[in-house]
Amino acid sequence: LLPSLNRQRNLWRRRHHRHHQSRLHSKRAARTTQRPKKSSNPSLYMHPSMDLRRLLITKPTPFFSPITRPLTCVRTTAQQRPHLQHEQPQPPLQHQKQPQPFDQSFLNRVTSILSNPSLDFSKCKDILTHLCPHQFDSLFFNIRSSVNPRTVLNFFYFASENCGFRFTVRSYCVLIRLLIVSKLAVPPRLLLIRLIDRKLPVLFNSPKNRHLEIATALADLNSGSESSLGIQTIDLLIHVYCTQFKNVGFDIALDVFRLFASKGLFPSVKTCNFLLSSLVKAHELQ
């Protein structure tokens, strides 16, 4: 009897186990059929807060503020940037043409106006209508030994401030030399400061390199018989750069010194010592 009961009990357990396994399999199949298929669009499963399209697109703000202070001068020893090397070449300036000569009567008339102790302003307007900057440059260079420096200085200021006449760099340099010869200390210095700082209407070939252009014009005007005058003009130019324009550094003064040295011209020992002491005080001596 006991073996028969054991067989029935084992048979019942097997049936119960098969029934239980069948129910579990049915439930799993039902869950699988009810589960939705994954979409190929990943945004359907993305949380709304993670949607990148909801992010605000802000414009980039500049790191550097715009420069409001004008630069007085620029170093010429620095290397040019790559994008500046591909700029289109500038067309030749009109003032490079040779000025036409004037007749002797007009030359005598200009000489008479600029050699008088006082300036006749009415005559100045008349002669300016017949002159361009380079015509006056050629004329002024030829009569420079016959004019009155003070009268010429007044003529320059009148023509530039009231008539907007633009003189050449060489014309200003000739005037500076005439004022130095006349033992006038303040006028040539003030004129040179305004010329460097572009406070005067002047024709520069390269405004960024105007310190070299001014130095070249002064060097070209120097001659063997006027070596003393040449040293005085060099001293004045270097002293102005070291005192009035030291806020931009002493690189400009050194560039000017090197240019004069390349032409065999040197400042006085006093000016050399002044330049050296200025470099030491500014901690720019290498």
Image (spheres, rainbow, N blue to C red):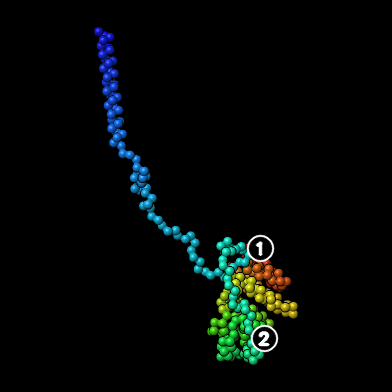
Local crowd at mark 1 within 10 Å, few (<14), some, or many (≥20)? few
Q: What residue type is labelled 2?
A: Ile
Where residue 46 sits in the image (x, y, percent)? 35, 45
What label sits on residue 39 in the rendered view?
none
The residue located at (49%, 65%) in the rendering is: 66
Local crowd at mark 2 within 10 Å, few (<14), some, or many (≥20)? some
The residue located at (66%, 87%) in the rendering is: 147
The residue located at (65%, 64%) in the rendering is: 280
> How many numbered badges does the structure rendering display?
2
Element at badge 2? loop
Residue extending furthest toward the top: 1
The residue located at (38%, 55%) in the rendering is: 56
| Pick the front one: 67 or 186 | 67
Observer able to see residue 115: no
Element at badge 1? loop
Asked whether the beta carbons under mark 2 and mark 1 sit within 8 Å of each other, the answer is no
Residue topped by disc 1: 285
Nearer-N-terminus badge (2/1): 2
Residue extending furthest toward the right: 225
What label sits on residue 143 in the rendered view?
2
In-image side of 161 versus 176 (left or right):
left
| Pick the front one: 104 or 80 | 104
Observer able to see residue 38: yes
Q: Quarter-wise, where is residue 1 in the image?
A: top left
- Label 2, label 1: how far apart the Cα atoms are: 44 Å
Q: What residue type is labelled 1?
A: Leu
Where residue 127 sits in the image (x, y, percent)? 59, 88
Q: Which part of the image, by quadrant, shows the C terminus? A: bottom right
